[in-house]
Image (spheres, helix red, strand yellow):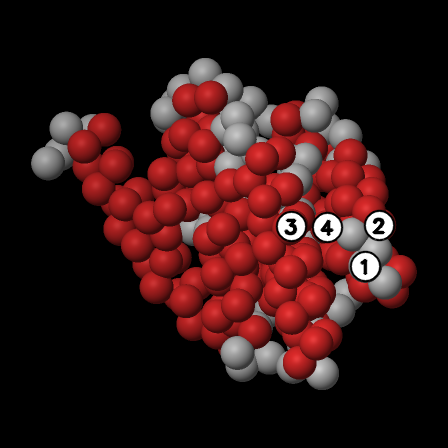
Amino acid sequence: MSTNKEHHKTLISKTKTFVKQTLANAEGGHDWFHTLRVYHNALLISKTETVDIFVVELAALLHDIADSKFHDGDDTIGPKMAREFLFQLNVDSQTIEHVVKIIENISFNKSLGNDMLFVSEELKVVQDADRLDAIGAIGIARAFNYGGFKNRPLFNPETKPNLNMSEAEYKTSTAPTINHFYEKLLLLKDKMNTKTGKQIAKKRHAYMEQFLEQFYDEWGGIK
């Protein structure tokens, strides 16, 4: 058993190196540090869940290896890259398939359609870990970093949030960054899967609400 653990440890180390190199020039909200935060979140959540920790670690590390936002909306590239990399490491086929399915189903936009065809306890953990990094102080920083990357306005009172977006509309939206709070970030608290994820999300959600209140006060010159 200890030999297997050591082998897994080696594979995780190689995966970290691969991801860090691959994301070396990534946008700041979807870079290696984002992946590392999700990885640590996943380890924390896993402490109170019954999961295959090896699958969780691999999926957390590889979940954003090729985010579709930066590949013309193509969400097949990431799973393909992950599959090829894990195959080269001689990871068993069952584990590879599980990790790939997690990557294929983790995104928020999947919840906007009817294509959530796969569910596992490991997916729930990694999905919560990823969603936690999209809310709170880090979530706010990431939202505006991406908005700046896409040259989007901070806020436009005339552009109302679309609260009933389809998956296609979400993927092609060019709305101001503040709209993203209502179209995604403030919805994540109630979409968490795990007990630990829900507990952490409550605090981060409250922080975002405080931020928005202050933002509107400053925008209107109130204080």
* Above/below status of 178 relative to 139: above
**Foreground of the two, 216 or 55:** 55
What numbered label is drawn on residue 12? none
Residue position marked by numbered label 2 in the rendering: 87
Residue that appears at 73% across and 32% down: 168
Q: Nearer the viewer, mark 3 or mark 4?
A: 3
Q: CA distance from mark 1 to mark 3?
A: 11 Å
Residue that appears at 41% across and 67% down: 200
* Above/below status of 150 relative to 167: above
What numbered label is drawn on residue 91? 1
Q: Earlier in the sequence, mark 4 or mark 2?
A: 2
To which quarter of the image does residue 156 belong? top left
Q: Earlier in the sequence, mark 1 or mark 3?
A: 3
Q: Nearer the viewer, mark 4 or mark 1?
A: 1
The residue tagged with tag 4: helix, strand or loop? helix
* Above/below status of 220 relative to 166: above
Image quadrant containing the C terminus: top left
The residue tagged with tag 3: helix, strand or loop? helix
Pinpoint residue 86: horizontal percent, then vertical percent.
Answer: 78, 51
What crowding class fits label 1: few (fewer than 14 Cα within 10 Å), some (14-19), or many (20 or more)? some
Quick check: 19 left or right of 216? right
Q: CA distance from mark 3 to mark 4?
A: 15 Å
**Foreground of the two, 41 or 145:** 41
* Above/below status of 49 relative to 61: below
Residue 190 appears in the rendering: no
Q: CA distance from mark 4 to mark 1?
A: 16 Å
> Three-letter amino acid code at disc 3?
Thr
**Decide: marks 4, 1 in contact (CB < 8 A)?**
no
Residue position marked by numbered label 3 in the rendering: 15
Q: CA distance from mark 4 to mark 2?
A: 16 Å
The residue tagged with tag 2: helix, strand or loop? helix
> Three-letter amino acid code at disc 1?
Val
